[in-house]
Image: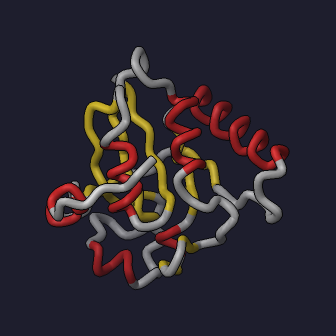
Amino acid sequence: MAIATFGAGCFWGVEEVFRTTDGVIATTVGYMGGTTLNPTYKDVCTDTTGHAEVVQVEYDPDVVSFDALVDIFFANHNPTEWNRQGPDEGTQYRSVVFYEDEGQKEVAERKKAELAASGKFKRPIVTIIEDVKDFWPAEDYHQKYLLKRGMSVCH
């Protein structure tokens, strides 16, 4: 098993996209990249902790590759939006890939460069690629939020 961590706006929809992907064993929503120890949702929503809302994905690399997960990440949010996605605004909604090792870093950087060169977007890709930080799971009520409410996202 392997781990990948992505931030692409509000973590509810992002989790659902990855949760329903073949080869994904488990997903956990939480917070990464900030300075506050054991932050709460209320803390992160102040936009002062430095954390991003993220989804940590446990996956089987024999079934789904990190390359494929990065493609899913880029296909399911707007990577040209700086610190926002849709109506959600703040650093906690930034587009970010937290890499576990140099292999993941290389893949994320290559995929970002390929997307930038593709001409799909008129504005620059602002996705941040940085090394993994402490992961703080979000409160239980955030876990599988859309699933618990009978909602889903198409991908």
Measuring from the top left, give residue 35's x and y in whole percent. 44, 67
Measuring from the top left, give residue 135's x and y in whole percent. 35, 52
How is colour applied across the structure in the image? secondary structure
Quadrant where the N terminus sits is: top left
Measuring from the top left, give residue 75's x and y in whole percent. 58, 48
Q: Is residue 18 above or below residue 39?
A: above
The residue under the point 61% across, 62% down is: 78
Q: Is residue 27 above or below residue 46?
A: above
Measuring from the top left, give residue 116's x and y in whole percent. 79, 49
Q: Please, which residue is most extreme toward the front here?
A: 154
Q: Is residue 155 above or below residue 65?
A: below
Q: Is residue 71 above or below residue 35?
A: above
The residue under the point 33% across, 34% down is: 58
Q: Please, which residue is most extreme toward the bottom here?
A: 46
The residue under the point 65% across, 56% down is: 127
The residue under the point 33% across, 79% down is: 43
Image mark count:
0
Q: 94 or 81: nearer the eye? A: 81
